[in-house]
């Protein structure tokens, strides 16, 4: 494994040393240029390997001769449990495909992802390998061959890639991506876009073929250019600069030098591709290829899985799919691909040096400079544009080069600089001299050496020189491209370190003092751990105030620094600042040092006092008179406090803190920041606990702590805020200590007596800012018990202080004593009354919720939140609790009635609430009664019922599957006694929640023409058919509530308690309900009719298009604002429409009779809601202009048809047209008799004889009857005899069927008399 360690930067002090003894020097520190020992030692094997690191540092390739190893980045956990990035072997094997060929060059090219969600990470990395045979092969990270190209038959010398770089400004030409391949006398450049598309296609095809053996799809051909480099003896390395355009002056200069005096110049300078080569004769050559002078060549791509190689290219894995025989493969492999000839490209100019031979060239990221190494041990810096050498370093034999480009941070620019200007960039040249074992960083072009590191002598400097391929100006927007520029690989310990350089090192020499300060700042951390005196001197040596302040901040935040050391360093720095000229000292730094020194001294003093208090008796006795009357206050609120403590003593999740160790000083300083200039402190509970909790819990001496705080220089107001924050945030701990209240009083008395606490001019008749601060903290706190206790203690301390002043001018007689009256005490009375109310309310809200209940978590309230929640805030909190506890409407009504009548809870007091096995009714009654007594106006029955109704309908809207929510909402609504409130709440419920679901159900049924199934109901309204039916039923009841007698009763006033009269916030439900406009009752009735029709259709599963039962006026009036005046149907309705309505209502009655018969047959007692359908149909018939008598006759016939004769006789009494009913019942009686005589299975001889004795007319009439129409044909003969008697009573004697009825009666009686 190769460890991918923490970044190798200029700030590492432990592993690497910065040789700063001779800044700017390039001489060998040891005075030796070439050591003899190094020549004698055998070079390690790594020096003979070809290496390449991906710019993303996620893939490393090591190759030698014909073998290669791929290492990929992975996370692993070391022995200490820490995770680190490692490079581990993922593939190794042989890459050569031809006999005798070996690997000459390797490059890793990461390919950008084409997905829209990509943020700059590569999709995959392609490994390009050049061989001595001239082949260039492309592999995946797992060693799978993608394609192979033979573009020239000489060995590959070097592979380099140029990728897209975001232009720094508009004057920079945007360069195209390309892959350049250098041969001894030729240069091939492959277009980056063509290569990117071909590699993606090949990778996808290889993956598809390996998985399923699919057919090969020919990828697009590669576009490349091939240049024959002339006029150089030997070439060892190259760089492709990209497309450049000469200026007009350079164009005219070149034309005159090449063409002479009469040379002509084109209108615009041509675009040229520039190439630089190094080698010999000349030492450096500059080539320029004019764009368009050579057409790109197209090379067919040979896939690794191709079945036939129609082009003359070769692939090593062409037989993977087994499509060819071995002989065919061998014949293909022996074929040599056709090599295109190169286009001659002469050298334009060079740097002639017959003795010097160039070894390598490294181009800078901005394409303006290049570093060249040679065999003389020199490093030359070239100006690419001008073609000249601008700098040279000596003493770097076998040097390896790399570049680091650093961008300036936005905050480092001058404030006067426009933010729209581009950021500055700095170029640093990194030189690794293996003979000397040193790594140096130089600023360019003429900058000094900014860093030098002592490293191993067998390392390798890895510099890719490119980034991701496939990126352009569009896809790169918003990307954070994560690439390392220069890395150093040490084979001794297997570490791979990146080189990072801060921008300020590139500044001019006059800024070197700032660079030195930054270096001193980095040394402080190490020095502080071991050598305090040296760390102190380093801090004093820093010149810039900003860096000095930053150094002091870093020291104070060091977790390993002892307090004594921090104190000494800070004191020394403060002393040095005071010794300087006051005008030259930075005021902010001076104030910062002074404040931090005070805080350090305070920390030290308080830390020493954290011991148990052994002698607090005298002090407590001295302040005991300050608390006269506190016992009466505690006795008054004791029961509520006890209940509150019990409710909050349940187990809960908490995070344990290390109480054994002291508070770290850096935590104390970071959480207690001192701003001396504005006298403000940011307090947190941890620092407050450090200062005050020992006193409150009785573990520290109160008097000594108070004296220490007085000497600290912190203002009393800030100490008071810190004390209150501790008290209010540690409520559970406060309630455990019985003496905490007295200790709090002691601290409050001490703080209030400090200078600057209470204004000396305060006389009690005005509000004191000191005590107002206490009230504000208590009012804002959600710790109800702690806030109340703090207010009670502060009230007594303030009252005693006012009494001692003796300056009150207003006194009232109370019994036999005089009591001082002041505005301050009145403020305390109101505050304590509010806090007591909040404590009672919070105790009720702390009731445990049943498991799995909805409605949200337990509400935490304070005086401030209640005042800001408006006049309905209390009722809203209580209604949410009632819903969460599952208190039914009937139970809540009983509780309120018992509370109003002052009745004790009788039987059933120990019963549990529905769904909550941990809370009994008596507890709810006790707590609710206590809250209602404190809020008689805010929690009046009508107000509470209204809020409960609203809360249930809100929850029903969230979860329509729970029909009980809507049912209880309607029940609560009906309990409201005031018609104005009842009407307003129902109107708001209709407008906010009901009308949307109601209209959706109507349109859905209109679309399907029947009662929809569960699946359709869930998809449209997210509710099942049964729940939708229940909702329609309760909707009908709720709509009836709109018909409240609002005109007979005056509207009530929304009242709150006197102490809560200042509540401001959202408008309450009561206020909204009373502001509702009156409704148009005919429109409400119109919707009630539709709701009844929908309910009936859903109940009995009838076919119905509800809107088709109304004319155009009726349809248009639906789902409008109930307060608007709409055109409703009036006058006589169309007979066809009335017939459709009549048929539907008759079907409803038929369905009800069937349900009634089934329930009686099964012995199930039917509910009162089932008996309502006949009356509902009769009411609907009068509204829908349907003859009510027809429905009654139909209902009588259906009841007799079902065998429910007794119910039919009850309904028969209301029928008006007896003649028609008698004729209908005569037929039904005939059907019953025909079934008994003709269709019964047990036909007896007497029955046959009776049939023979019947008159022929009656016999013929009975035979024409169809008993199959009867749902209960086997009715008892006694019921049939009673029925025919009823028929004879209804038919007049002159009726045409009267005689038939008499014969029928005789036949029934005869049949009934048979044994």
Image (cartoon, grey):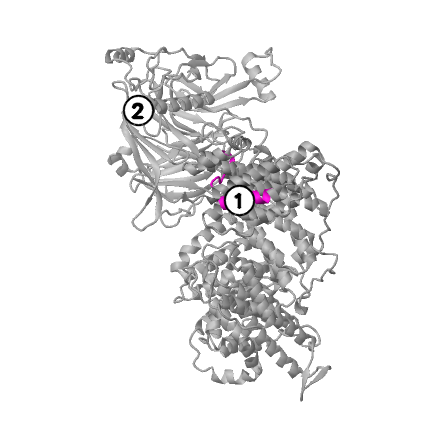
Prevailing secondary structure class for the magenta stretch in the rendered image: helix
Label 2, secondary structure: give it: strand
The answer, for residue 371, to whether it is visible in the render is no
- On residue 103, the disc is 2
113 versus 1088 height, above or below? above
Question: Residue 810, image x and y in percent?
Answer: 73, 81
| In this rendering, position of residue 715 left or right of residue 72 | right
- In the rendered view of the protein, which quadrant contains the N terminus? top left
User: Residue visible at 63% across and 79% down?
Assistant: 799
| In this rendering, position of residue 304 left or right of residue 979 | left
User: Residue visible at 53% across and 41% down?
Assistant: 1306
- Stretch in magenta: 1267-1287
The residue identified by callout 1 is 1281
Looking at the rendered structure, the number of numbered marks drawn on it comes to 2
636 versus 489 height, above or below? below
> Dividing the picture into quarters, in which one does residue 1222 lie?
top right
341 versus 730 height, above or below? above
């Amino acid at each position: 494994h190769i460890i991918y360690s923490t970044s190798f930067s200029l700030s590492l002090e432990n592993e690497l040393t910065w040789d700063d003894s001779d800044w700017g020097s390039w001489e060998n520190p040891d005075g030796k240029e070439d050591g003899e020992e190094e020549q004698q030692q055998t070079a390690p094997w790594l020096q003979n390997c070809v290496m390449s690191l991906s710019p993303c540092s996620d893939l490393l390739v090591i190759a030698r001769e014909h073998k290669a190893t791929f290492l990929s980045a992975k996370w692993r956990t070391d022995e200490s449990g820490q995770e680190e990035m490692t490079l581990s072997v993922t593939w190794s094997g042989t890459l050569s495909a031809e006999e005798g060929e070996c690997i000459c060059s390797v490059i890793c090219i990461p390919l950008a992802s084409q997905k829209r969600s990509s943020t700059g990470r590569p999709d995959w990395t392609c490994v390009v390998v050049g061989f001595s045979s001239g082949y260039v092969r492309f592999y995946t990270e797992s060693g799978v061959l993608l394609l192979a190209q033979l573009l020239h038959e000489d060995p590959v010398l070097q592979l380099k890639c140029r990728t897209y770089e975001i232009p720094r400004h508009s004057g920079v030409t945007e360069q195209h991506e390309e892959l350049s391949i250098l041969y001894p006398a030729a240069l091939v450049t492959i277009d980056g876009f063509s290569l990117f598309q071909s590699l993606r296609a090949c990778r996808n095809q290889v993956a598809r073929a390996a998985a399923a053996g699919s057919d090969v799809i020919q990828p697009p051909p590669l576009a490349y250019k091939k240049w024959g480099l002339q006029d150089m003896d030997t070439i060892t390395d190259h760089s492709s600069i990209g497309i450049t355009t000469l200026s007009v002056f350079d164009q005219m200069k070149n034309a005159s030098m090449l063409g002479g005096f009469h040379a002509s110049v084109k209108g615009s300078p041509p675009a040229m591709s520039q190439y630089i080569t190094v080698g010999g004769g000349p030492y450096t050559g500059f080539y320029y290829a004019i764009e368009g002078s050579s057409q790109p060549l197209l090379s067919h791509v040979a896939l690794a899985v191709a079945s036939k190689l129609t082009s003359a290219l070769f692939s090593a894995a062409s037989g993977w799919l087994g499509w060819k025989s071995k002989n065919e493969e061998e014949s293909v492999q022996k074929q040599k691909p056709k090599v295109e000839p190169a286009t001659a490209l002469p050298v334009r100019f060079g740097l002639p040096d017959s003795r010097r031979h160039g070894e390598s060239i490294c181009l800078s990221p901005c394409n303006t400079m290049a570093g060249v190494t040679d065999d003389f041990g020199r490093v030359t810096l070239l100006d690419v544009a001008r073609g000249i050498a601008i700098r040279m370093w000596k003493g770097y034999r076998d040097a390896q080069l790399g570049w680091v480009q650093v961008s300036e941070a936005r905050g480092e620019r001058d404030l006067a600089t426009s933010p729209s200007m581009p950021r500055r960039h700095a170029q640093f040249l990194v030189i690794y001299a293996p003979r000397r074992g040193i790594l140096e960083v130089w600023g360019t072009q003429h900058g000094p050496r900014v860093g030098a590191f002592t490293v191993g002598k067998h390392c390798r400097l890895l510099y890719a020189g490119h980034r991701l391929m496939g990126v352009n100006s569009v896809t790169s927007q918003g990307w954070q491209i994560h690439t390392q520029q220069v890395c150093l690989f040490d084979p001794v310990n297997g570490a791979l370190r990146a080189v990072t350089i801060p921008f300020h090192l590139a500044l001019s020499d006059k800024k070197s003092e700032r660079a030195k300060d930054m270096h001193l700042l980095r040394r402080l951390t190490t020095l502080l751990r071991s050598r305090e005196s040296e760390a102190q001197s380093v801090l004093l040596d820093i010149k810039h105030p900003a860096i000095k302040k930053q150094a002091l901040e870093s020291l104070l935040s060091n977790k390993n620094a002892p307090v004594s050391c921090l104190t000494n360093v800070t004191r020394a720095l403060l002393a040095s600042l005071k010794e300087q000229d006051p005008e030259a000292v930075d005021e902010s730094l001076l104030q910062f040092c002074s404040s931090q020194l005070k805080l350090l001294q305070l920390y030290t003093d308080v830390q020493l006092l954290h011991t148990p208090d052994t002698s607090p008796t005298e002090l407590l006795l001295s302040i005991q008179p300050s608390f006269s009357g506190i016992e009466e206050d505690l006795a008054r609120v004791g029961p509520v406090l006890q209940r509150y403590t019990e409710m909050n003593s349940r187990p809960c999740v908490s995070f344990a803190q290390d109480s054994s160790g002291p508070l770290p000083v850096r935590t104390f300083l970071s959480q207690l920041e001192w701003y001396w200039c504005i006298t403000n402190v940011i307090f947190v509970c941890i620092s407050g606990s450090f200062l005050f909790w020992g006193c409150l819990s009785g573990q520290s001496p109160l008097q000594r702590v108070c004296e220490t705080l007085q000497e600290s220089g912190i203002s009393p107001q800030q100490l008071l805020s810190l004390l209150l924050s501790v008290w209010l945030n540690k409520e559970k701990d406060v309630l455990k200590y019985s003496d905490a209240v007295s200790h709090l009083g002691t601290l409050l008395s001490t703080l209030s007596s400090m200078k600057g606490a209470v204004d000396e001019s305060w006389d009690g008749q005005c509000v004191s800012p000191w005590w107002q601060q206490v009230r504000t903290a208590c009012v804002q706190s959600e710790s109800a018990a702690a806030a109340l206790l703090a207010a009670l203690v502060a009230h007594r301390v303030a009252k005693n202080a006012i009494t001692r002043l003796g300056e009150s001018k207003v006194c009232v007689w109370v019994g036999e004593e005089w009591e001082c009256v002041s505005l301050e005490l009145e403020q305390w009375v109101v505050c304590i009354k509010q806090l007591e109310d909040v404590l009672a309310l919070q105790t009720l809200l702390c009731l445990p919720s049943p498991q799995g209940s909805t409605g949200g978590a337990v509400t935490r309230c304070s005086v401030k939140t209640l005042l800001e929640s408006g006049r309905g805030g209390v009722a809203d909190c209580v209604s949410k609790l009632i819903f969460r506890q599952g208190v039914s409407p009937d139970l809540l009504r009983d509780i309120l009635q018992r509370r109003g009548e002052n009745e004790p809870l009788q039987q059933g007091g120990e019963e549990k609430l529905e769904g909550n096995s941990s809370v009994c009714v008596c507890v709810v009654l006790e707590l609710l009664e206590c809250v209602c007594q404190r809020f008689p106006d805010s929690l009046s029955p009508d107000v509470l019922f209204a809020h409960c109704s609203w809360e249930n309908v809100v929850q029903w809207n969230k979860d329509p599957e729970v029909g009980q929510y809507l049912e209880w909402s309607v029940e609560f609504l009906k309990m409201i006694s005031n018609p104005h409130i009842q009407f307003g709440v129902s109107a708001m419920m209709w407008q906010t929640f009901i009308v949307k679901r109601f209209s959706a159900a109507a349109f859905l049924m209109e679309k399907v023409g029947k009662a929809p199934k569960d699946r359709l109901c869930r998809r449209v309204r997210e509710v099942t058919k049964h729940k939708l039916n229940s909702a329609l039923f309760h909707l009908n009841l709720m709509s009836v509530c709109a018909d409240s007698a609002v005109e007979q009763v005056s509207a009530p006033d929304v009242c709150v308690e006197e102490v809560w009269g200042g509540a401001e916030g959202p408008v309450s439900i009561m206020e909204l309900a009373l502001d509702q406009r009156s409704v148009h009752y005919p429109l409400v009735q119109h919707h009630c009719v539709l709701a009844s029709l929908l309910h009936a259709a859903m109940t009995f599963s009838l076919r119905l298009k509800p809107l088709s039962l109304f004319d155009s006026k009726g349809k248009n009036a639906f789902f409008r604002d109930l307060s608007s005046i709409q055109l409703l149907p009036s006058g006589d309705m169309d007979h066809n429409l009335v017939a459709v309505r009549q048929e539907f209502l008759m079907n409803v009655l038929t369905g009800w009779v069937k349900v009634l018969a089934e329930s009686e047959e099964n012995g199930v007692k039917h509910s009162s809601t089932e008996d309502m359908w006949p009356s509902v149909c009769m009411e609907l018939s009068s509204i829908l202009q349907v003859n009510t008598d027809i429905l009654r006759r139909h209902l009588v016939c259906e009841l007799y048809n079902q065998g429910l004769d007794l119910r039919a006789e009850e309904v028969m009494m209301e029928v008006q047209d007896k003649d028609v009913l008698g004729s209908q019942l005569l037929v039904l009686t005939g059907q019953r008799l025909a079934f008994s005589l003709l269709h019964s299975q047990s036909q007896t001889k007497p029955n046959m004889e009776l049939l023979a004795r019947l008159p022929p007319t009656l016999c013929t009439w009975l035979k024409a009857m169809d008993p199959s129409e009867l749902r209960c044909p086997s009715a008892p003969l006694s019921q049939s005899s009673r029925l025919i008697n009823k028929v004879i009573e209804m038919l007049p004697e002159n009726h045409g069927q009267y005689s038939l009825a008499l014969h029928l009666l005789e036949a029934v009686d005869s049949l009934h008399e048979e044994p």
